[in-house]
Image (cartoon, helix red, strand yellow):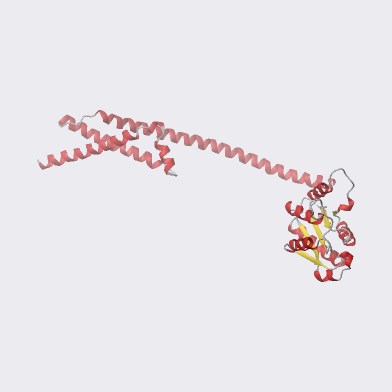
């Protein structure tokens, strides 16, 4: 699909009338649209407002400069320089054509700058810091415009304009392609949502199971609080039973903790601070008590063996 680009041409006017016309003709020859200030109609809004709007609408910006600074705006800055800086600000793709120093030396006096030489020198220096095409005369300018423009379009293609009748055929094909792709995405999205729901259910079931197992173990530990550790056959048997129960509970807790993975210390702390785990201190005391029971049991057995 062929695109038509709008190209803003910026330059001083009085000294470059023929060169501006030549660039405009080259753009038209390429079937694009040149935009130059002399083609604008008079309007109520300010000249600078019109210029900015035309640059905004354009796809590319071309500046041609010789040895004149040009007309100044109210702020004391030349319109050509203001146009260039605005195009840079708007990140328009730019082609810069500067007349070479050797060619400028051969210009007549009326085509040379006399009033604003410092501003012209500074502006030319600013332009020269970018990728610049140097030209000597009208023919050389046109000859260098064509490859420079093709290169810029290739490197930085823009939106441009297209015929309405060519858009319909292309849009229909693109619409069908995008519609089919969208249907596939909708189907895949639905499948992913179902998988997410299933996984959430499994996670909830897993967490509920762990919580139930933890509560069961906690109850077993709480039961140990009521055991009295006294000497005697009956109490000795109760102590054995308590130790056995403690071993079983420890195994259950170990299995539970081994399945709980934590990505950070903070997550682990949050885990222990959950409502059904809010007696962490009591658990610690019970574990300590259980260890004392185990040690006491071992001492009693060792004493019995010695006797």
Check the image and report above or below for 277 versus 26: above
Q: Position of residue 212 (x, y in %)?
A: 39, 31
Q: Is residue 299 left or right of residue 146?
A: left
Q: Is residue 261 visible?
A: no
Quarter occupied by residue 274: top left
Q: Position of residue 153 (x, y in %)?
A: 77, 57
Q: Is residue 293 left or right of residue 156?
A: left
Among all residues in the image, which is located at the extreme left?
Answer: 307
Q: Position of residue 158 (x, y in %)?
A: 76, 52
The residue closer to the viewer here, 80 or 299, is: 80
Q: Residue sitting at 24 percent across and 33 percent down?
A: 242
The residue closer to the viewer here, 151 or 12, is: 12
Q: Is residue 235 left or right of residue 73?
A: left
The residue closer to the viewer here, 113 or 23, is: 113
Q: Residue sitting at 84 percent across and 48 percent down?
A: 47
Among all residues in the image, which is located at the extreme front?
Answer: 115
Where, quadrant-wise, is the C terminus in this rendering? top left
Q: How many numbered marks are there?
A: 0
Q: Is residue 78 visible?
A: yes
Q: Residue sitting at 36 percent across and 31 percent down?
A: 215
Q: Position of residue 116 (x, y in %)?
A: 81, 61
Check the image and report above or below for 194 versus 142: above
Quarter occupied by residue 197: top right
Q: Residue sitting at 58 percent across and 37 percent down?
A: 193
Q: Is residue 156 left or right of residue 283?
A: right
């Amino acid at each position: 699909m062929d695109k038509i680009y709008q190209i803003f041409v910026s330059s001083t006017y009085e000294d470059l009338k023929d060169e501006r016309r030549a660039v405009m003709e080259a753009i038209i020859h390429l079937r694009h649209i040149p935009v130059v200030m002399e083609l604008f109609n008079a309007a109520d809004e300010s000249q600078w407002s019109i210029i900015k709007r035309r640059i905004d609408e354009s796809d590319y910006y071309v500046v041609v400069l010789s040895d004149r600074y040009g007309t100044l705006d109210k702020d004391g800055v030349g319109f050509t320089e203001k146009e260039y800086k605005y195009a840079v600000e708007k990140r328009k793709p730019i082609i810069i054509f500067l007349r070479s120093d050797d060619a400028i030396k051969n210009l007549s006096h009326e085509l040379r700058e006399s009033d604003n030489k410092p501003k012209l020198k500074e502006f030319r220096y600013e332009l020269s810091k970018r990728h610049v095409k140097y030209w000597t005369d009208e023919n050389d300018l046109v000859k260098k415009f064509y490859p420079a423009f093709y290169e810029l379009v290739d490197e930085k293609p823009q939106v441009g304009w297209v015929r309405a009748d060519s858009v319909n055929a292309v849009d229909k094909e693109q619409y069908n392609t995008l519609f089919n792709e969208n249907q596939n995405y909708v189907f895949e999205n639905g499948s992913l949502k179902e998988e997410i729901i299933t996984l959430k259910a499994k996670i909830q079931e897993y967490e509920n199971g762990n919580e139930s197992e933890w509560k069961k173990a906690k109850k077993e530990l709480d039961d140990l609080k009521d055991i009295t550790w006294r000497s005697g056959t009956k109490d000795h048997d109760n102590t054995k039973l308590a130790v056995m129960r403690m071993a079983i509970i420890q195994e259950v807790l170990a299995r539970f903790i081994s399945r709980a993975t934590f990505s950070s210390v903070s997550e682990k702390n949050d885990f222990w601070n959950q409502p059904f785990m809010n007696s962490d201190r009591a658990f610690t005391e019970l574990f300590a008590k259980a260890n004392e029971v185990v040690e006491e049991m071992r001492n009693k057995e060792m004493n019995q063996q010695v006797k």
